[in-house]
Image (spheres, coloured by chain):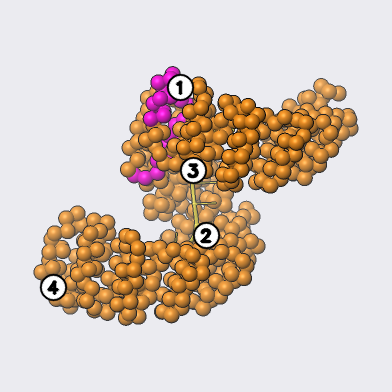
Chain colours: A orange, B yellow
DNA sequence: GTAGGGTTAG
């Protein structure tokens, strides 16, 4: 009988085993009176955990009198992995007062739970306990600690743990390198990488991923390319994980040519790589390509998930045609994920931007569960159509629900005020945001307030508001002010505006166009000519149309 | 004990 059970067990260990096969196995174990055996109990607990049946897992744990450390670890891990951290910690506490001694895996698992719930205090206590058990030099514990400390931004503590280890293994090196990577300290990461190579340790895919993940912007693209080149040169297999990180790196930097090249080299691209590529095209503004890759994925690739659907919906919103977006909506309905918060929020926005506010509102009303993003979506959408009172009403609902409005909520509200020309309401929300909700005003908020005041002719007030900003004022705020001065033909603030716009000249030529309009309005033709002649980089980009229209005015 | 993608703000 045992042999038969062992055979069944190995069959169950296959990745595609299900909850029902676990139940059958459990029943068999009970029938053979083996359920008291911690070995089988552990296996079944793990199977239940994989199938998200924590209740059965817990029942079995409770019913097993002899609890090996494997059994304890399995049930603790089961809770931790489904983010039931409180239960995981309670069990851990029970374990500590039981006769069983926790092992390195227990500490590693609980440490990870601390990191996932951002509980620095608990992690430190755990660290102390682990030292008490004499596990501070254990590779598994210390790599878990290095990971957790760096995930919580405590890179110095991570490095302290790392330096305490005499001859780190590859996983520990990788943990420390990716710690530096994830906190953006790529110079330290590369230095450590060199040290590692000097000790004779050979990198693997994890090392490369760790090195590259922190590189996010254009200035670091070269570094990424060098690392990419290094791994190819050293004959390191560009396994799909490394390749997918590269796809994501190149996509983030909007270098879609390289992203595609690496993507094509993938033997079998998984959902994450597809998503990185599609998001890359979308962020680079190539929405059509993003959607065509999405179509290809639907036909040949893995099934999309809510995250990807939200990405492609935002891409189709940018196209301002409802066709692609509603096709995606239909797809989402067919696959029963149209009511996911992520998907619905993107749907509301897409319908509103494509001219179908009503459908967007319907989607909102049909949502079984909402979060602040969904509320923000509907507020901005209503605002976009000038339906400010309804947007205000949604805001009240947020408060009734006990949700916390965020920065974006107020961007939406202020934009609604702008679209409806409600200066006093805008002022009120701006103050409430700062005083009641302690949200600091950001560029977007200032843009809307400046527009709101400026369009109402309160140019002096708008100017005072800009001057009250602590720190750097983004050129777009000056741009908003400039456009108000233009429409009121007010030349009082011309000099100060010109100063700020010209400082940011190369960034965006729209502002110099508007500035030349203002100058022209004031009859300062020499300045206009100078602006057109002396603006270096922006020169070629400056459209001639505003110039011509101003001359003929 | 180690890896990658995300919605709202015109």
A1 drawn magenta: no
Q: Are marks 3 and 4 in contact (CB under 8 Å)?
A: no
Residue at image mark 2: A346
Lower sequence index among marks 3 and 1: 3
A202 drawn magenta: yes
Which residue sits at x=36%, y=77%?
A453
Query: Which of label 2 and label 4 is nearer to you?
Result: 4
Q: Mark yes or no: residue A467 visible.
A: yes
User: How crowded is the residue under tag 2: few (<14 C-alpha within 10 Å), some, or many (20+)?
Assistant: many
Do badges 2 and 4 share one subunit? yes
Q: Is residue B3 left or right of residue A191?
A: right
Q: What's the distance in space between the residues labelled 4 and 1, CA to CA?
A: 67 Å
User: How crowded is the residue under tag 1: few (<14 C-alpha within 10 Å), some, or many (20+)?
Assistant: few
User: How crowded is the residue under tag 4: few (<14 C-alpha within 10 Å), some, or many (20+)?
Assistant: few
Q: Are marks 3 and 2 in contact (CB under 8 Å)?
A: no
In the image, residue A172 sits, relative to residue A502, either above or below, namely above
Q: Is residue A455 left or right of residue A297?
A: left
Q: Residue furthest top?
A: A200
Q: Is residue A205 left or right of residue A450?
A: right
Q: What's the distance in space between the residues labelled 3 and 2, CA to CA?
A: 31 Å
Residue at image mark 3: A153
Where does the image place residue A13, in percent across and percent down from the top left? 71, 30
Which residue sits at x=41%, y=79%?
A423
Where does the image place residue A392, in percent across and percent down from the top left? 52, 75
Placement of the N terminus of chain A among the 4 image quadrants: top right
Q: What's the distance in space between the residues labelled 3 and 4, CA to CA?
A: 54 Å
Lower sequence index among marks 3 and 2: 3
In the image, residue A450 sits, relative to residue A193, either above or below, namely below
Residue at image mark 1: A202
């Amino acid at each position: 009988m045992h042999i038969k059970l062992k055979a069944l067990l190995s069959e169950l260990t296959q990745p595609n085993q299900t909850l029902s096969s676990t139940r059958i196995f459990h029943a068999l174990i009970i029938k053979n009176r083996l359920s008291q055996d911690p070995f089988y109990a552990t296996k079944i607990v793990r199977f239940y955990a994989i199938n998200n049946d924590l209740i059965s897992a817990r029942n079995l744990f409770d019913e097993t009198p002899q609890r090996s450390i494997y059994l304890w670890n399995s049930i603790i891990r089961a809770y931790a992995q489904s983010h039931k951290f409180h239960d995981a910690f309670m069990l851990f506490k029970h374990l500590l007062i039981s006769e069983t001694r926790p092992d390195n895996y227990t500490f590693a698992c609980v440490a990870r739970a601390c990191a996932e719930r951002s509980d620095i205090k608990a992690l430190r206590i755990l660290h102390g306990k682990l030292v008490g058990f004499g596990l501070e030099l254990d590779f598994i514990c210390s790599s878990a600690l290095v990971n957790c400390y760096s995930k919580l931004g405590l890179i110095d503590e991570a490095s302290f743990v790392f330096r305490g280890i005499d001859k780190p293994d590859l996983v520990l090196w990788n943990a420390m390198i990716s710690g530096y990577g994830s906190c953006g300290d790529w110079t330290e990461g590369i230095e450590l990488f060199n040290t590692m190579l000097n000790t004779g340790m050979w990198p693997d895919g994890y090392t490369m991923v760790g090195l590259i993940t922190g590189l996010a912007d254009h200035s670091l693209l070269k570094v990424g390319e060098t690392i990419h080149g290094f791994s190819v040169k050293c004959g390191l297999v560009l396994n799909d994980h490394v390749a997918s990180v590269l796809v994501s790196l190149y996509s983030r930097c909007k270098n879609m040519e390289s992203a595609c090249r690496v993507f094509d080299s993938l033997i079998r691209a998984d959902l994450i790589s597809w998503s990185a590529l599609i998001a890359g095209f979308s962020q680079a503004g190539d929405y059509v390509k993003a959607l065509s890759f999405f179509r290809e994925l639907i036909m040949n690739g893995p099934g999309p998930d809510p995250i990807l659907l939200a990405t492609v919906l935002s891409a189709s919103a940018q196209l301002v045609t409802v066709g692609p977006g509603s096709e995606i909506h239909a797809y989402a309905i067919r696959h029963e994920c149209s009511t996911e918060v992520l998907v619905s929020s993107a749907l509301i926005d897409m319908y509103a931007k494509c001219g179908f506010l009503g459908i967007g509102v319907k989607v909102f009303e049909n949502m079984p569960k909402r979060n602040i993003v969904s509320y923000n979506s509907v507020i901005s959408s209503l605002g976009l159509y000038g339906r400010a009172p309804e947007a205000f009403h949604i805001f009240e609902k947020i408060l009734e629900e006990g949700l916390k409005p965020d920065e974006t909520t107020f961007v939406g509200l202020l934009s609604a005020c702008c679209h409806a020309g409600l200066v006093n309401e805008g002022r009120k929300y701006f103050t409430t945001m700062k005083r009641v909700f302690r949200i600091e005003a950001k560029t977007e908020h200032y843009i809307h307030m400046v527009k709101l005041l400026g369009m109402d002719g309160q140019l002096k007030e708008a100017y005072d508001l800009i001057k009250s900003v602590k720190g750097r004022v983004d050129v777009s705020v000056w741009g908003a002010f400039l456009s108000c001065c233009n429409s009121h033909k007010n030349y009082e603030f011309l000099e100060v505006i010109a100063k700020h716009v010209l400082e940011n000249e190369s960034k965006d030529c729209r502002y110099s166009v508007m500035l030349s309009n203002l100058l022209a309005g004031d009859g300062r033709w020499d300045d206009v000519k100078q602006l057109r002649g002396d603006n270096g980089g922006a020169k070629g980009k400056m459209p001639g149309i505003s110039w011509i229209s101003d001359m003929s005015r």
